[in-house]
Image (spheres, rainbow, N blue to C red):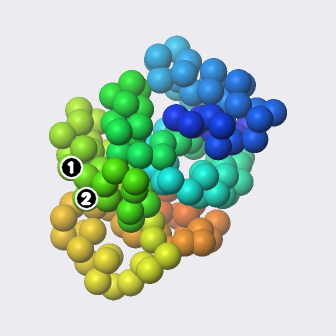
Amino acid sequence: MRKVSSAMPSQLSSNCNTRIHATYSRRVAGTTNPGPNLLSISSASGDHAALGRILLGTPWHIAAARTCRGAKALLHRGSVSAILCAHDLPDGTWRDILNLSATSTQSPPVIVTSRLADDRLWAEVLNLGGYDVLAKPFHEQEVRHVLTSAANQISGQ
């Protein structure tokens, strides 16, 4: 069963907000940890919904944030295996999230998303220590492949 949480629960459909938020809160508190946690950071609620559909049936659990500030709070509250971050955010950019990841105790890989995902952005992300770039709109196989590769890197496989 797919579990999605949000720093802004009003962005998710109202019929699942309570269950989803409670599930992520328990996971963050360390009472359960059945799979990897993805921190999705985007001001576009459609990005979080698309990831939820794409990752349905996988072990990934999604925590959603709309801002750098919200992402920082979620990153410090619990275990994050990977970060999927929009190119631009209301209070910063992917570079701010990359710095945040680098200074956290977990140092999860950062995957940048952009409608204009080109070779220049990909080279910049990799040169600054990011993991990869995903083009939007998301393609299911590409998202799953990148996250699987990131998880394998984390686990040393």
Above-or-below relation of 125 to 66: below
Which sits in the foreground, 110 or 68?
68
Residue plotted at (49% across, 54% down): 42
Which sits in the foreground, 68 or 53?
68
Residue named by callout 2: 95
Position in image of residue 95 (x %, y %): 25, 58
Residue plotted at (71% across, 54% down): 53
Outermost bottom residue:
119
Residue type (three-letter) at the residue carrying disc 1 = Asn
Q: Which mark is residue 148?
A: none
Query: Are the two marked residues, 2 and 1, in contact with CB atoms closer than 8 angstroms?
Result: yes
Q: Which mark is residue 99?
A: 1
Position in image of residue 84 (x %, y %): 44, 54
Tag 2 secondary structure: helix
Outermost right residue:
15
* Residue 38 visible in the current orientation: no
Looking at the image, residue 155 sits to the left or right of residue 142; the answer is left
Badge 2 density bin: few <14, some 14–19, many ≥20, Cα 10 Å: some
Tag 1 secondary structure: helix
Looking at the image, residue 34 sits to the left or right of residue 119; the answer is right
Q: Quadrant of residue 74?
A: top left
Position in image of residue 54 (x %, y %): 67, 57
Q: Quadrant of residue 85?
A: bottom left
Residue type (three-letter) at the residue carrying disc 2 = Arg
As measured in the structure, the alpha-carbon distance from the residue carrying label 2 to the one carrying label 1 is 6 Å
Q: Quadrant of the N terminus?
A: top right
Residue plotted at (31% across, 54% down): 92
